[in-house]
Image (spheres, helix red, strand yellow):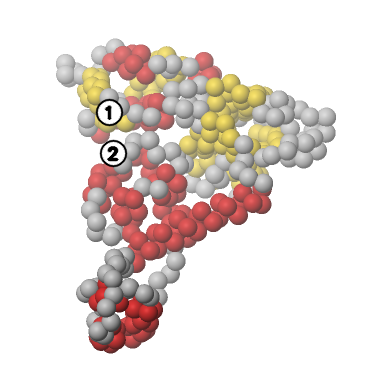
Protein backbone atom coordinates (compact mmCIF):
# COMPACT_ATOMS: atom_id res chain seq x y z
CA UNK A 1 0.00 0.00 0.00
CA UNK A 2 1.43 3.34 -1.09
CA UNK A 3 0.64 7.06 -0.93
CA UNK A 4 1.71 7.58 -4.54
CA UNK A 5 -0.99 5.89 -6.59
CA UNK A 6 -1.44 8.13 -9.65
CA UNK A 7 -3.50 6.03 -12.10
CA UNK A 8 -6.34 3.47 -11.71
CA UNK A 9 -3.96 0.88 -13.15
CA UNK A 10 -1.66 1.39 -10.15
CA UNK A 11 -4.47 0.23 -7.86
CA UNK A 12 -5.40 -2.69 -10.14
CA UNK A 13 -1.82 -3.91 -9.92
CA UNK A 14 -1.97 -3.96 -6.12
CA UNK A 15 -2.94 -7.42 -4.87
CA UNK A 16 -4.26 -6.06 -1.55
CA UNK A 17 -6.60 -3.66 -3.37
CA UNK A 18 -8.06 -6.52 -5.43
CA UNK A 19 -8.44 -8.56 -2.24
CA UNK A 20 -10.36 -5.67 -0.65
CA UNK A 21 -12.58 -5.17 -3.71
CA UNK A 22 -13.46 -8.85 -4.16
CA UNK A 23 -13.72 -9.42 -0.37
CA UNK A 24 -11.63 -12.58 -0.48
CA UNK A 25 -11.14 -12.60 3.28
CA UNK A 26 -7.37 -12.74 2.95
CA UNK A 27 -6.91 -9.80 5.32
CA UNK A 28 -6.04 -6.18 4.72
CA UNK A 29 -9.59 -5.02 4.00
CA UNK A 30 -9.65 -2.76 7.05
CA UNK A 31 -6.30 -1.30 6.00
CA UNK A 32 -7.86 -0.07 2.76
CA UNK A 33 -10.83 1.42 4.59
CA UNK A 34 -8.43 3.39 6.79
CA UNK A 35 -6.31 4.39 3.78
CA UNK A 36 -9.31 5.83 1.92
CA UNK A 37 -10.49 7.68 5.02
CA UNK A 38 -7.05 9.28 5.34
CA UNK A 39 -6.77 10.05 1.62
CA UNK A 40 -10.00 11.80 0.59
CA UNK A 41 -8.11 13.34 -2.34
CA UNK A 42 -7.75 9.83 -3.83
CA UNK A 43 -11.50 9.11 -3.78
CA UNK A 44 -11.92 9.74 -7.52
CA UNK A 45 -8.93 7.50 -8.29
CA UNK A 46 -10.44 4.62 -6.29
CA UNK A 47 -13.81 5.13 -8.01
CA UNK A 48 -12.17 4.94 -11.43
CA UNK A 49 -10.41 1.69 -10.52
CA UNK A 50 -13.66 0.21 -9.19
CA UNK A 51 -15.52 1.26 -12.35
CA UNK A 52 -12.90 -0.52 -14.47
CA UNK A 53 -13.31 -3.68 -12.42
CA UNK A 54 -17.11 -3.46 -12.52
CA UNK A 55 -17.26 -2.83 -16.28
CA UNK A 56 -14.96 -5.73 -17.09
CA UNK A 57 -16.13 -8.17 -14.44
CA UNK A 58 -17.25 -11.51 -15.80
CA UNK A 59 -20.65 -12.78 -14.65
CA UNK A 60 -20.42 -15.93 -12.56
CA UNK A 61 -22.93 -18.66 -13.29
CA UNK A 62 -23.68 -21.37 -10.79
CA UNK A 63 -22.37 -24.67 -12.14
CA UNK A 64 -24.34 -27.80 -11.17
CA UNK A 65 -22.51 -30.12 -8.80
CA UNK A 66 -22.76 -33.08 -11.18
CA UNK A 67 -20.98 -31.07 -13.92
CA UNK A 68 -18.19 -30.17 -11.54
CA UNK A 69 -17.82 -33.79 -10.48
CA UNK A 70 -17.75 -34.97 -14.11
CA UNK A 71 -15.18 -32.35 -15.06
CA UNK A 72 -13.03 -33.25 -12.05
CA UNK A 73 -13.19 -36.95 -12.90
CA UNK A 74 -12.24 -36.28 -16.53
CA UNK A 75 -9.34 -34.08 -15.46
CA UNK A 76 -7.82 -36.65 -13.15
CA UNK A 77 -8.28 -39.40 -15.73
CA UNK A 78 -6.06 -37.40 -18.05
CA UNK A 79 -3.56 -36.78 -15.25
CA UNK A 80 -3.50 -40.46 -14.40
CA UNK A 81 -2.86 -41.32 -18.05
CA UNK A 82 0.39 -39.35 -18.01
CA UNK A 83 3.55 -41.37 -17.30
CA UNK A 84 4.53 -41.23 -13.66
CA UNK A 85 1.51 -39.16 -12.56
CA UNK A 86 -0.81 -41.78 -11.10
CA UNK A 87 0.81 -42.19 -7.71
CA UNK A 88 1.18 -38.45 -7.28
CA UNK A 89 -2.48 -37.88 -8.10
CA UNK A 90 -3.48 -40.46 -5.50
CA UNK A 91 -1.83 -38.34 -2.83
CA UNK A 92 -4.21 -35.48 -3.56
CA UNK A 93 -6.97 -35.45 -0.89
CA UNK A 94 -9.18 -33.44 -3.27
CA UNK A 95 -9.71 -36.60 -5.38
CA UNK A 96 -12.71 -38.51 -4.07
CA UNK A 97 -15.38 -40.87 -5.27
CA UNK A 98 -15.12 -42.46 -8.73
CA UNK A 99 -12.03 -40.47 -9.62
CA UNK A 100 -10.08 -42.00 -6.68
CA UNK A 101 -11.35 -45.48 -7.42
CA UNK A 102 -10.21 -45.25 -11.02
CA UNK A 103 -6.74 -44.27 -9.83
CA UNK A 104 -6.52 -47.22 -7.36
CA UNK A 105 -4.43 -49.50 -9.56
CA UNK A 106 -1.23 -51.37 -8.70
CA UNK A 107 0.72 -49.55 -11.38
CA UNK A 108 3.96 -48.23 -9.97
CA UNK A 109 4.86 -44.66 -10.78
CA UNK A 110 7.50 -42.13 -9.95
CA UNK A 111 6.00 -39.55 -7.64
CA UNK A 112 5.85 -36.02 -9.06
CA UNK A 113 4.32 -32.93 -7.50
CA UNK A 114 0.91 -31.78 -8.65
CA UNK A 115 0.10 -28.10 -8.68
CA UNK A 116 -2.78 -27.25 -6.31
CA UNK A 117 -6.16 -26.38 -7.79
CA UNK A 118 -7.12 -22.89 -6.65
CA UNK A 119 -10.76 -22.74 -5.66
CA UNK A 120 -11.11 -19.01 -4.97
CA UNK A 121 -13.21 -18.00 -7.96
CA UNK A 122 -12.95 -14.31 -7.10
CA UNK A 123 -9.23 -14.41 -7.78
CA UNK A 124 -9.98 -16.13 -11.08
CA UNK A 125 -12.25 -13.23 -11.94
CA UNK A 126 -9.55 -10.76 -10.94
CA UNK A 127 -7.05 -12.52 -13.18
CA UNK A 128 -9.55 -12.46 -16.04
CA UNK A 129 -10.12 -8.74 -15.51
CA UNK A 130 -6.41 -7.96 -15.66
CA UNK A 131 -6.03 -10.19 -18.70
CA UNK A 132 -8.89 -8.42 -20.50
CA UNK A 133 -7.38 -5.03 -19.69
CA UNK A 134 -4.02 -6.14 -21.02
CA UNK A 135 -5.61 -7.46 -24.22
CA UNK A 136 -7.52 -4.21 -24.61
CA UNK A 137 -4.32 -2.21 -24.33
CA UNK A 138 -2.65 -4.46 -26.88
CA UNK A 139 -5.53 -3.94 -29.33
CA UNK A 140 -5.34 -0.17 -28.90
CA UNK A 141 -1.59 -0.22 -29.51
CA UNK A 142 -2.03 -2.37 -32.63
CA UNK A 143 -4.63 0.02 -34.01
CA UNK A 144 -2.70 3.18 -33.26
CA UNK A 145 0.77 1.92 -34.07
CA UNK A 146 1.83 1.94 -30.43
CA UNK A 147 1.23 4.02 -27.34
CA UNK A 148 0.75 7.76 -27.74
CA UNK A 149 3.85 9.90 -27.06
CA UNK A 150 3.74 11.21 -23.50
CA UNK A 151 5.37 13.92 -21.41
CA UNK A 152 5.02 14.22 -17.65
CA UNK A 153 6.22 16.05 -14.58
CA UNK A 154 7.10 14.52 -11.25
CA UNK A 155 6.12 15.71 -7.78
CA UNK A 156 7.55 19.14 -7.03
CA UNK A 157 8.54 19.72 -10.67
CA UNK A 158 7.49 22.56 -13.00
CA UNK A 159 8.29 22.07 -16.69
CA UNK A 160 8.21 24.15 -19.90
CA UNK A 161 7.71 21.93 -22.97
CA UNK A 162 6.91 22.19 -26.69
CA UNK A 163 4.53 19.95 -28.62
CA UNK A 164 5.27 18.86 -32.24
CA UNK A 165 3.44 21.89 -33.74
CA UNK A 166 5.38 24.38 -31.60
CA UNK A 167 2.63 24.82 -29.01
CA UNK A 168 4.14 25.88 -25.68
CA UNK A 169 3.04 24.07 -22.55
CA UNK A 170 3.84 24.89 -18.93
CA UNK A 171 3.12 21.79 -16.86
CA UNK A 172 2.44 21.92 -13.13
CA UNK A 173 3.79 19.24 -10.81
CA UNK A 174 2.38 15.70 -10.97
CA UNK A 175 0.85 16.16 -14.45
CA UNK A 176 0.78 14.07 -17.60
CA UNK A 177 0.09 14.86 -21.26
CA UNK A 178 -0.14 12.44 -24.17
CA UNK A 179 -0.79 13.42 -27.77
CA UNK A 180 -1.72 11.85 -31.10
CA UNK A 181 0.96 10.85 -33.56
CA UNK A 182 1.78 12.40 -36.95
CA UNK A 183 0.53 15.94 -36.48
CA UNK A 184 -0.02 17.36 -39.97
CA UNK A 185 -1.51 20.70 -40.93
CA UNK A 186 -5.15 20.22 -41.83
CA UNK A 187 -5.75 17.45 -39.27
CA UNK A 188 -6.79 17.77 -35.63
CA UNK A 189 -4.03 18.07 -33.06
CA UNK A 190 -5.30 16.01 -30.09
CA UNK A 191 -4.01 16.07 -26.51
CA UNK A 192 -5.08 14.08 -23.44
CA UNK A 193 -4.12 15.47 -20.05
CA UNK A 194 -4.27 14.81 -16.33
CA UNK A 195 -3.07 17.33 -13.77
CA UNK A 196 -2.68 21.00 -14.65
CA UNK A 197 -1.13 22.74 -17.66
CA UNK A 198 -1.12 26.14 -19.35
CA UNK A 199 -1.25 26.03 -23.17
CA UNK A 200 -0.11 28.68 -25.65
CA UNK A 201 -1.40 27.09 -28.85
CA UNK A 202 0.37 27.77 -32.14
CA UNK A 203 -1.74 28.68 -35.14
CA UNK A 204 -1.26 26.75 -38.37
CA UNK A 205 -1.68 27.97 -41.98
CA UNK A 206 -4.75 25.78 -42.39
CA UNK A 207 -6.07 26.68 -38.91
CA UNK A 208 -6.02 23.08 -37.72
CA UNK A 209 -8.06 22.51 -34.58
CA UNK A 210 -6.24 21.90 -31.30
CA UNK A 211 -8.26 19.65 -28.97
CA UNK A 212 -7.56 18.99 -25.28
CA UNK A 213 -9.45 16.01 -23.85
CA UNK A 214 -10.34 15.91 -20.14
CA UNK A 215 -12.48 13.29 -18.40
CA UNK A 216 -15.81 14.99 -19.14
CA UNK A 217 -15.35 17.55 -21.92
CA UNK A 218 -13.19 18.59 -24.87
CA UNK A 219 -11.58 22.00 -25.36
CA UNK A 220 -11.48 22.96 -29.04
CA UNK A 221 -9.30 25.88 -30.21
CA UNK A 222 -7.19 27.13 -33.14
CA UNK A 223 -4.72 29.52 -31.47
CA UNK A 224 -5.09 30.80 -27.91
CA UNK A 225 -3.80 30.71 -24.31
CA UNK A 226 -5.62 28.90 -21.52
CA UNK A 227 -5.15 26.96 -18.29
CA UNK A 228 -6.65 23.49 -17.77
CA UNK A 229 -7.11 21.45 -14.58
CA UNK A 230 -8.13 17.78 -14.70
CA UNK A 231 -7.31 16.23 -11.34
CA UNK A 232 -9.24 14.00 -8.90
CA UNK A 233 -12.61 14.78 -10.50
CA UNK A 234 -11.97 18.54 -10.53
CA UNK A 235 -12.04 19.94 -14.08
CA UNK A 236 -11.91 23.58 -15.08
CA UNK A 237 -10.67 25.94 -17.79
CA UNK A 238 -9.44 29.53 -17.53
CA UNK A 239 -9.21 31.37 -20.86
CA UNK A 240 -6.56 34.10 -20.96
CA UNK A 241 -6.52 34.95 -24.65
CA UNK A 242 -8.47 34.05 -27.82
CA UNK A 243 -11.56 31.87 -27.77
CA UNK A 244 -12.35 28.23 -27.11
CA UNK A 245 -15.38 25.99 -27.36
CA UNK A 246 -16.13 23.37 -24.72
CA UNK A 247 -17.94 20.22 -25.86
CA UNK A 248 -19.49 17.94 -23.24
CA UNK A 249 -20.24 14.24 -23.58
CA UNK A 250 -23.99 15.03 -23.65
CA UNK A 251 -23.54 17.12 -26.78
CA UNK A 252 -23.86 20.52 -25.10
CA UNK A 253 -21.45 23.29 -26.16
CA UNK A 254 -20.23 26.36 -24.29
CA UNK A 255 -18.20 29.15 -25.93
CA UNK A 256 -15.66 31.01 -23.80
CA UNK A 257 -14.24 34.52 -24.06
CA UNK A 258 -11.02 35.93 -22.53
CA UNK A 259 -11.26 36.10 -18.74
CA UNK A 260 -13.91 33.36 -18.54
CA UNK A 261 -13.53 30.58 -16.00
CA UNK A 262 -15.62 27.43 -16.45
CA UNK A 263 -15.76 24.46 -14.11
CA UNK A 264 -17.42 21.05 -14.47
CA UNK A 265 -19.77 20.33 -11.58
CA UNK A 266 -22.82 18.09 -11.14
CA UNK A 267 -22.41 16.84 -14.72
CA UNK A 268 -22.69 20.39 -16.10
CA UNK A 269 -20.41 23.22 -17.19
CA UNK A 270 -20.67 26.29 -14.97
CA UNK A 271 -19.25 29.75 -15.66
CA UNK A 272 -17.82 31.51 -12.56
CA UNK A 273 -15.99 34.71 -11.61
CA UNK A 274 -12.42 34.28 -10.34
CA UNK A 275 -9.18 36.20 -9.84
CA UNK A 276 -7.24 35.21 -12.94
CA UNK A 277 -3.79 36.06 -11.56
CA UNK A 278 -4.40 33.89 -8.50
CA UNK A 279 -5.27 30.81 -10.55
CA UNK A 280 -2.19 30.89 -12.75
CA UNK A 281 0.28 32.02 -10.08
CA UNK A 282 1.54 28.43 -10.04
CA UNK A 283 3.48 29.22 -13.24
CA UNK A 284 5.61 31.54 -11.11
CA UNK A 285 5.82 28.83 -8.42
CA UNK A 286 3.59 30.76 -6.05
CA UNK A 287 0.38 30.02 -4.19
CA UNK A 288 -2.03 32.94 -3.91
CA UNK A 289 -4.46 32.19 -1.11
CA UNK A 290 -7.59 34.21 -0.42
CA UNK A 291 -9.46 32.78 2.55
CA UNK A 292 -8.55 29.33 1.32
CA UNK A 293 -9.72 26.51 3.64
CA UNK A 294 -6.82 24.57 5.14
CA UNK A 295 -8.20 21.26 3.82
CA UNK A 296 -8.08 22.65 0.26
CA UNK A 297 -4.49 23.75 0.77
CA UNK A 298 -3.48 20.29 1.99
CA UNK A 299 -4.95 18.78 -1.20
CA UNK A 300 -2.86 21.19 -3.29
CA UNK A 301 0.30 20.27 -1.37
CA UNK A 302 -0.45 16.54 -1.70
CA UNK A 303 -0.82 16.89 -5.48
CA UNK A 304 2.29 19.03 -5.82
CA UNK A 305 4.72 17.04 -3.71
CA UNK A 306 3.31 13.52 -3.33
CA UNK A 307 3.28 13.61 0.47
CA UNK A 308 0.48 12.72 2.84
CA UNK A 309 -0.83 15.51 5.04
CA UNK A 310 -3.12 14.61 7.92
CA UNK A 311 -5.17 17.13 9.85
CA UNK A 312 -5.06 16.44 13.57
CA UNK A 313 -8.81 17.08 13.66
CA UNK A 314 -11.41 17.93 11.04
CA UNK A 315 -12.36 21.23 12.66
CA UNK A 316 -9.11 22.95 11.67
CA UNK A 317 -9.82 22.04 8.06
CA UNK A 318 -12.31 24.91 8.01
CA UNK A 319 -9.63 27.40 9.07
CA UNK A 320 -8.82 29.78 6.24
CA UNK A 321 -5.50 31.18 5.04
CA UNK A 322 -4.77 34.32 3.01
CA UNK A 323 -1.46 35.43 1.55
CA UNK A 324 1.15 34.60 -1.09
CA UNK A 325 3.38 31.59 -0.39
CA UNK A 326 6.43 30.39 -2.30
CA UNK A 327 5.75 27.01 -3.89
CA UNK A 328 9.13 25.85 -5.20
CA UNK A 329 10.22 23.96 -2.08
CA UNK A 330 8.15 21.85 0.30
CA UNK A 331 10.20 22.69 3.39
CA UNK A 332 9.94 26.42 2.71
CA UNK A 333 6.20 26.09 2.13
CA UNK A 334 5.69 24.25 5.43
CA UNK A 335 7.78 26.80 7.31
CA UNK A 336 5.68 29.60 5.84
CA UNK A 337 2.54 27.79 6.95
CA UNK A 338 3.94 27.35 10.43
CA UNK A 339 4.96 31.03 10.53
CA UNK A 340 1.31 32.07 10.52
CA UNK A 341 1.37 31.09 14.23
CA UNK A 342 -2.01 29.43 13.77
CA UNK A 343 -0.68 25.92 13.13
CA UNK A 344 1.95 23.46 14.26
CA UNK A 345 3.46 21.34 11.48
CA UNK A 346 4.98 17.98 12.41
CA UNK A 347 6.86 16.12 9.68
CA UNK A 348 8.12 12.55 9.76
CA UNK A 349 9.44 11.57 6.33
CA UNK A 350 6.63 11.89 3.81
CA UNK A 351 3.99 11.96 6.55
CA UNK A 352 2.96 15.42 7.76
CA UNK A 353 0.52 16.32 10.53
CA UNK A 354 -0.99 19.77 10.95
CA UNK A 355 -2.68 20.75 14.18
CA UNK A 356 -3.83 23.94 15.83
CA UNK A 357 -1.00 25.86 17.47
CA UNK A 358 -0.63 24.86 21.11
CA UNK A 359 -0.93 28.49 22.22
CA UNK A 360 -4.02 29.18 20.14
CA UNK A 361 -7.23 29.84 22.01
- Residue 90 visible, this angle: yes
Quadrant of the drawing holding the C terminus: top left
Front-lying residue, 212 or 184: 184
Q: Say left or right for 74 vs 281.
A: left
Q: Say left or right for 92 vs 216.
A: left
Quadrant of the drawing holding the N terminus: top left
Residue 268 falls in image quadrant? top right
The residue that appears at 27% across and 31% down in the rendered structure is 310
Residue 66 in the image, given as x and y percentages of width and height: 33, 86
SS of the residue at dot 1? strand
Residue 149 falls in image quadrant? top right
The residue that appears at 22% across and 32% down in the rendered structure is 313
Residue 216 in the image, given as x and y percentages of width and height: 56, 45
Residue mark closest to the camera, 2 vs 1: 1
- Residue 55 visible, this angle: no
Is the residue 301 above or below the residue 214 in the image? above
Q: Residue furthest right?
A: 205
Upstream in the sequence, badge 2 or badge 1? 2
Residue 353 falls in image quadrant? top left
Please give the residue where the numbered disc 1 appears in the rendered image.
351
Other-residue count near label 2 (Cα within 10 Å), few / some / many at <14 / 14–19 / ≥20 = some
Residue 60 in the image, given as x and y percentages of width and height: 40, 71
Amino acid sequence: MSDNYREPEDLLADESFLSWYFKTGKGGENDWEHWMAEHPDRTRLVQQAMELLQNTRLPEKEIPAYQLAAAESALFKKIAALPGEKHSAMQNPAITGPAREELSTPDAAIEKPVLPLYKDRRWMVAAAVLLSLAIGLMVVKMRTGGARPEIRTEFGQLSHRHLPDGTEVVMNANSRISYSRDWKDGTDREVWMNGEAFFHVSKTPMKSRFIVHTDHFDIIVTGTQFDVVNRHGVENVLLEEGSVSLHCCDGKTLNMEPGDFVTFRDQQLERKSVQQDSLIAWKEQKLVLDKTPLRDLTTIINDQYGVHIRLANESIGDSTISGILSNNNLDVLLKALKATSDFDVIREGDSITIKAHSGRN
